[in-house]
Image (spheres, grey):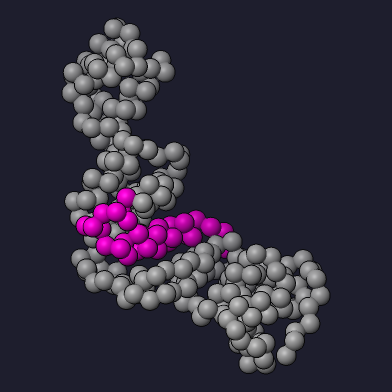
Amino acid sequence: MPGVERVVAELTLGPPPDAESLRALCRVHEVSEEDSAALVETLPRLCVYRELVRGNLQEALRLSLPRTIARLGTRFEEYFDRFLAERAPRTHYLRDVTPELLDYCAPLWEGDPHVPAYLLELAQHEALHIQVSAMPTPPLGHVAAGLALDQGVTLSAALRLVYYRNAVHELPEDEADRTAPTARAVSLLVYRSPEHDVRYLELSPLARGILERLLGGEALGAAVQGAATAEGAALTETVLSGAAQLLADLAERGVVWGPAAKGPSFRPHL
């Protein structure tokens, strides 16, 4: 039976089959003559099954990447077919097919002059919406506990910190739009609010540095000092006040939950 399963898998993921190509697949996988004849006899039903599977995968991708797929045009079908034939999904969950496809396409798109250089970033940005939507958030009305410089910060699990070379998050939602994004470096926090909305917050380099360090487990004071040092900024009252405002804003957005376990003591050097 494993041989039959491999035949059905290749029939589903590969080019459209006919009776002769199906017989050839059966010979390659050493399927018995009896089973081979049964498969050929049921070829019309197998083709219906093939289209259902491929249609479900395509629909999941179109829901995740509507603007990316619209900008690819007919080339989407080409890359979709190649993905199925050369790699195929390895996940049991439709929502995870999109990142698998993008991992496969990333090096191919870089070498394709017909694919805009920014398109992978747009695709990754679109895909984040479903990924972050599936992550847990605090209950509505959750109030973050007070923070301390010598403690870490517990952040929502429903977030992603991303960096783009192009401002793809500013592109119109209209799938018919073909505007190219502005070429500028962007640090973006993508998070899910307590109201279950996926939202986006553009960050300054200092704010990004603080969040990176907090996500890495550093105490709040050390994270602020490290981010300021990396940006060549003195740890002034202005910097500390700005960090406090950032954290207060993130608490209101449901990103900051409260303090983490107490870490090494910290004393700011003003």
Position of residue 196 in the picture relative to residue 173 (left or right): right
Compared across the picture, whether 192 is left or right of 173 comes to right
Residue stretch rendered in magenta on the structure: 108-137
| Tag count | 0
Image point 62% across, 82% down: which residue?
A: 228
Residue 249 in the image, given as x and y percentages of width and height? 57, 81
Residue at image coords 24%, 72%? 179
Quarter location, residue 141 = bottom right
Relative to 42, say whether 71 is above or below. Answer: below
Give how far across and how far down residue 50 sits, in percent. Answer: 27, 32
Q: In which quarter of the image is the N terminus?
A: top left
Q: Is residue 142 visible?
A: no
Quarter where residue 56 is shown: top left
- In front of the other: 22 or 94: 22
Residue 256 place in picture, x, y as percent: 62, 72
Could you tell me residue 134's position as x and y percent? 50, 56
Q: In this view, does 16 lie to the left or right of 152?
A: left
Q: Is 113 in the magenta? A: yes
Rendered position, 106 above or below 92? below
